[in-house]
Amino acid sequence: MARISASFMMIVMALVFCASAQAARIKDIVAVEGIRDNMLLGYGLVVGLNGTGDRLQNSAFTEQSLIAFLERQGVNTRGTSLKTRNVAAVTVTAKLPGFSRTGSNIDVSVSAMGDAKSLQGGTLLATPLYGADGEVYAVAQGAIALGGFEASGQSGSSITKGVPTSGAVANGAVVEREIDFDLNGLKSVKLALRNPDLSTANHIAEAINGRVGPGTANMIDPGTVMVHANPAYKGDVATMLADIETLDVQTDQIARIVIDEASGTIVMGENVRIDTVAVAQGNLVVKVDEAPKVSQPNAFAPEGAQTVVVPSTNVSVNENSDARMAVLKNSATLKDLVAGLNALGVGPRDMITILQTIKAAGALQADIQTR
C-alpha cells in the first residue's frame, strides 16, 4: 500500500512539474474585474415528501409558512391543527453569473432548515431569490435531485447515505432581472490574478502590450494588471478582451509544498530547492502482544476454587538495522529531493515528517502549507 501511495505521489509531482513548465492562457489565470457571480438567497417550501418532512410542532416557521401559502391559494387553515409530515422549510441558494439575461436558467441548491429527515421525492414550490440589495433576481421551482438517501424499517433500524437533507434543482431558477454592466463603456479594465505573482503579472502586461500596442497594459501590483481601452478598438472593450484572453504567458510561482496530513498527500512545485543536508530515517517498532492464559482448578482442588484468566504480556523491540542515510546536495531540485527520500524507502506519511524537519533545520528553501 505504501508503494502504491508513493507511486501516486510521484505521478502527481510529475504532473505539477510538467504543468508549470507550460505557458498558460490569460483567461485561465485571471478574472476580469466586474465580471463575476452574484449570490442569491431565498426561503421556500418543499412538498411531496413521504413522511420525512418537518414536524410542525417542532418547526413553527414551517407551520406559519404553510398556513400563509394555503391562504394565498384561498384555503383558510388558521385555528386548525396541521399534522402533515410531507412539507419541509428550506433555504434556496444560487449563483447568478455575470451577463445572465432575462429568461435564462441557473442551477439552485436546496437545504432543509427544520428537522426533516430527507428531501427525497420533494418538489420545491416557487421561491423568489434575492440579491444583496434585496431585489428579486430569479424564481426557483422544480423537483429536487439528491446525492444521498435515507431508509428505515419498523424495527427502528435505518441506513443513510450521503446527506439526504440537501439537494439541487438543475436549471431550476429562471432569471427575472438582469444586472446592468456596460463593459464597452469602460475606459480601463483590471485583470485580477488568481495566484498573485510579480513575474506572472509582468509577463501578462508584456504579452498584452505586444499584441495590442505599447502602453495598453501595466502591472499595478502582484495581483492586478491594468488594461486601458485602446483607441484601435473604438470603444469595443469586449473585442479587445477576447483578443488578449487567449494569449499565452509564462507563469511563475513561489517555491511551495502543500501537505494534506489527513490523506497523506504531498504536492511540490518545481522551484523547491534545498541546501546540503543528510537525512536518516530509522524505524523503531515496539510490539506488545497480549496472550492471556486460562487457569483451571484440578480435580481434587479444595472447595471454592475457580477458573481464572491469568494475563500474559510479551514485549519486543525491533529497530531496523538497515536504516540508511541519504545526502541531498546543495541546490538539489525536486527530482533530487524525491529520489533521495525514496532511496530511504519512506512512505508519504514519513515523508511529511521529514520535509517538516528539513524545513525546521533551515535547509528547505520553500514554503510549507498544511491543510
Image (cartoon, rainbow, N blue to C red):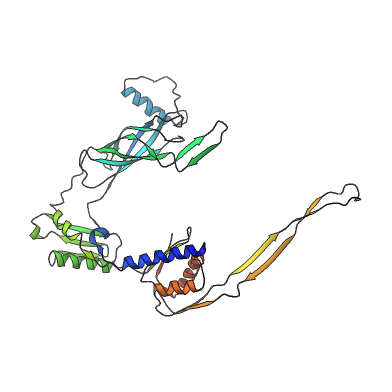
104 left or right, relative to 166: left
Residue 12's spot in the image, x, y percent? 40, 64
Q: Position of residue 259 (x, y in %)?
A: 44, 63
Left or right: 303, with 9 as reference point: right
Quadrant of the snapshot with the C terminus: bottom left
Where 59 falls versus 267 (above or below)? Answer: above
Against 78, is 155 above or below?
below
117 or 365: nearer the viewer: 117
Q: In this rendering, is residue 45 above or below 1? A: above
Residue name at image x 51 percent, y 69 percent: 346
Kindly tell me whether residue 206 is visible in this rendering. yes
Percent position (x, y) of residue 306? 84, 49
Q: Which residue: 54% across, 33% down?
A: 153
Quadrant of residue 221 within the rendered picture: bottom left
Name the one closer to the observer, 268 or 39.
Answer: 268
Q: Is residue 23 left or right of residue 335?
A: left
Q: Residue at x 27, y 62 (%)?
A: 223
Q: Inspect this view and state whether residue 257 appears.
A: no
Name the residue nearer the viewer: 50 or 191: 50
Q: Position of residue 204 (x, y in %)?
A: 22, 65
Point 45% across, 21% down: residue: 81
